[in-house]
Image (spheres, rainbow, N blue to C red):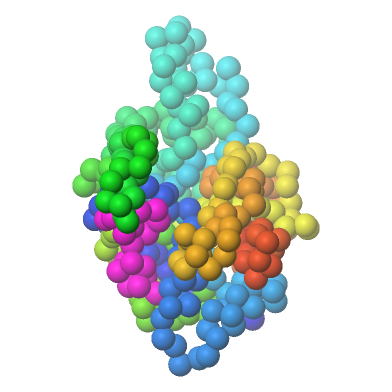
């Protein structure tokens, strides 16, 4: 098997966005780009997807994260005694809001995560880091504003409104919050190929309502991924949305996402297929951790799922982007 080349795709948003940068959605955009672009090789998309049936996926992609941040690894809750060792028993009531906020935090500074990687990651050590960096993380969460925007439905033929208002949640990012990192490993595409693919996605726009100006961005590609893995991992944290395969480990700590996938490209409006929606799926979110004493770099988890639509050719990206950790 050809070794993976690693890349970091740096995204800079140029407009509001509706669809989050999640791995399965990003993969769908990649596939449509491969399909529409001109290649010397015939049946480029079909050959690319066939590689996933060999057991060695030709491309792995993560979610997109605020630049300088990673998902908080999900671990068992810290004990009351450990909390009091950090903040003092007499300060628990005064800091109750901060404690509750830390419990709900889902990101952390990447440099602090890398420091944790030097040893075992324990709930206590993670809590210490989150407590010390609380203000920094809180400020990062304020980079993006979620706003319910009111819209009308318009009959384009008759030129009139056909029903009342409906609201749609849109995300507006401050300048500091427009920068995202997406991590990618591939043994199928070279850097020039990736430039070509992301140029296409950039020109077309990303996610919902891209035709009305949402999801537009600039990007650059850097070689390498600046996140080390643990020297003696006994677990992994996924940087992507993920569904374990039949023989993958499932013991760990996780949050779940209920995904209602929708087809993109020519299938998005149901023009070529009567039903543009996939079957609902339950996925583990980025930051979920799974125990695996046999973990090693290059080991793969997940699959390119079948039976997600009445058209059997349609599949759903459900691979982990694993990062070896010791917990």
Instruction: Report the residue that reaches farthest toward the right.
Output: 247
Outermost residue toward the front in this view: 158
Q: Quadrant of the C terminus?
A: top right
Q: Which residue occupies 33% across, 67% down? A: 204
Q: Is residue 211 magenta?
A: yes
Q: Quadrant of the N terminus?
A: bottom right
**Percent coordinates x, y for residue 174 in the rendering:** 23, 43
- Which residue is at a point 44% across and 88% down the rendered structure image? 39
Q: In terms of image quadrants, where is residue 43?
A: bottom right
Looking at the rendered structure, the number of numbered marks drawn on it comes to 0
Examine the rendering and report whether any part of residue 181 can be seen.
no
Q: Residue at 40% across / 64% down in the picture?
A: 8
Q: For this rendering, which residue is in front, 294 or 218?
A: 218
Q: Is residue 153 magenta?
A: no
Q: Which residues are magenta?
A: 197-214
Q: Position of residue 111 (x, y in %)?
A: 39, 48
Which residue is pictured at 37% across the width and 30% down the height?
134
Q: Main secondary structure of the magenta part?
A: helix
Residue farthest bottom in this picture: 40
Residue 169 to residue 61: above or below? above
Q: Is residue 81 visible?
A: yes
- Report the front residue among 111 and 54: 54
Position of residue 218 measured from the top left corner of the image (x, y, whole percent): 27, 63
Image location of residue 187, percent across then percent down? 54, 78
**In the rendered image of this protein, does residue 266 appear above or below residue 145?**
below
């Amino acid at each position: 098997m050809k070794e993976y080349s690693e890349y970091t795709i740096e995204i800079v948003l140029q407009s509001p966005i509706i669809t989050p940068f999640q791995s399965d959605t990003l993969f769908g955009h990649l596939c449509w780009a491969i399909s529409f672009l001109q290649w010397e090789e015939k049946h480029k998309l079909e050959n690319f997807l066939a590689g996933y049936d060999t057991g060695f996926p030709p491309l792995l992609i993560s979610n997109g994260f605020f630049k300088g941040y990673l998902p908080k690894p999900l671990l068992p809750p810290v004990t009351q005694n450990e909390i009091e060792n950090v903040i003092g028993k007499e300060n628990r009531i005064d800091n109750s809001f901060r404690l509750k906020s830390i419990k709900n935090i889902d990101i952390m500074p990447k440099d602090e995560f890398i420091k944790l990687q030097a040893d075992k990651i324990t709930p206590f050590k993670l809590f210490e880091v989150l407590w010390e960096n609380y203000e920094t993380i809180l400020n990062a969460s304020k980079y993006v504003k979620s706003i319910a925007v009111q819209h009308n439905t318009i009959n384009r033929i008759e030129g009139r409104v056909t029903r009342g208002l409906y609201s749609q949640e849109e995300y507006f990012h401050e300048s500091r919050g427009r920068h995202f990192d997406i991590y990618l490993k591939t043994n199928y595409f070279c850097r020039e190929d990736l430039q070509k693919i992301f140029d296409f996605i950039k020109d077309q726009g990303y996610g919902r309502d891209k035709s009305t100006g949402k999801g537009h961005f600039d990007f650059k590609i850097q070689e390498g991924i600046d996140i080390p893995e643990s020297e003696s991992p006994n677990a992994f944290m996924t940087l992507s949305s993920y569904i374990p395969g039949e023989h993958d480990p499932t013991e760990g700590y996780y949050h779940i996402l209920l995904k209602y996938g929708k087809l993109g490209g020519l299938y998005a409006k149901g023009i070529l297929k009567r039903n543009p929606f996939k079957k609902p799926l339950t996925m583990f979110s980025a930051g979920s951790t799974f125990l695996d004493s046999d973990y090693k770099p290059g080991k793969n988890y997940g699959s390119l799922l079948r039976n997600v639509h009445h058209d059997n050719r349609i599949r759903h990206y459900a691979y982990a982007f694993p990062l070896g950790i010791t917990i």
